[in-house]
Image (cartoon, rainbow, N blue to C red):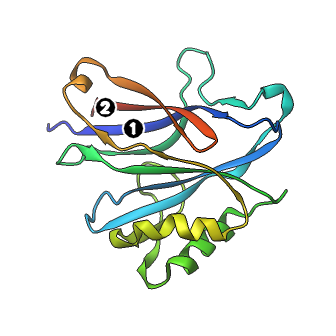
Amino acid sequence: MKTMTRVRLELNRLKINRPKKRWRIYFVIVAEHPEDADKMVLTVIPNDPIRMVPSQENVVDFGGDGEGREGLLLLRREMPLHRELNVHCYVRHSRSDVRDIGEILSDIRTGIGADAVGLVENILGTTNIWLAIVKSALPLVGNVLRKIRDRDMGFISMFERFGPEFEQEEEIDLEKTGGHSTVVYSWSVDEE
């Protein structure tokens, strides 16, 4: 039986680098389409924004400290043949107490126009609804998000080249800062 190599991306920790202590955070994730090299897919995670309060000191730990606890799953898919994966993470603060994630996807779809191909489900190992777009429309995503009245908290490139370090380690933890946000995320590789 042939084994399949799969990659998994999780968000482990988020820190907001601003003095304000109350936030309603969500993420717009853009990734390569697993079946069509000419397309990208994007989604909004989680369904309801994460409410941060002063006692959290602007930090959310998604994995916690317990053994076996994992972070916030962003995607899980088969290893690309070229062993590289391009993923973008936009951190956003909802200015509305009630943010409709479907409305955000609809606004992005409208802003991208004809380059938005359609909605897809059951893709990238999550139950999220993803919007497929042509790869050439990728530069439009940031511009479209600027027109949505929520606050831009930062952009993080989670691009990864799965090199020999993944043969030694099953999971690699990385930390990056973009804008007002610092994230700790992990890429893991496993055989099925």
What is the quadrant of the N terminus in the image? top left
Return the residue at label 1.
8
Foreground residue among 185 and 71: 185
Q: CA distance from mark 1 to mark 2?
A: 6 Å
Q: Is residue 108 above or below residue 85?
A: below
Say whether residue 185 is left or right of residue 97: left
Return the residue at label 2.
189
Q: Is residue 130 above or below residue 81?
A: below
Verify CB contact (< 8 Å) between mark 1 and mark 2: yes
Q: Is residue 188 above or below residue 142?
A: above
Q: Amino acid at mark 1?
A: Arg
The quarter of the displayed image where residue 72 is located? top right
Say whether residue 83 is left or right of residue 136: left
Expressed as whole percent of the image width and height from the top left, the position of residue 56 reads 78, 27
Q: Indicate which disc residue 166 carries.
A: none
What is the quadrant of the C terminus in the image? top left
Residue under the image location 50 percent in, 77 percent down? 112
The quarter of the displayed image where residue 152 is located? bottom right
* Mark 2 closeness class: few <14, some 14–19, many ≥20 residues within 10 Å: many
Q: Amino acid at mark 2?
A: Val
Residue under the image location 82 percent in, 39 percent down? 20
Expressed as whole percent of the image width and height from the top left, the position of residue 143 reads 54, 69
Question: Element at badge 2?
Answer: strand
Residue under the image location 53 percent in, 62 percent down? 129
Expressed as whole percent of the image width and height from the top left, the position of residue 82 reads 17, 47
Residue under the image location 21 percent in, 31 percent down? 163
Expressed as whole percent of the image width and height from the top left, the position of residue 150 reads 72, 60
* Mark 1 closeness class: few <14, some 14–19, many ≥20 residues within 10 Å: some
Foreground residue among 62 and 183: 183
Q: Give the total number of marks visible in the rendering.
A: 2
Question: Element at badge 1?
Answer: strand
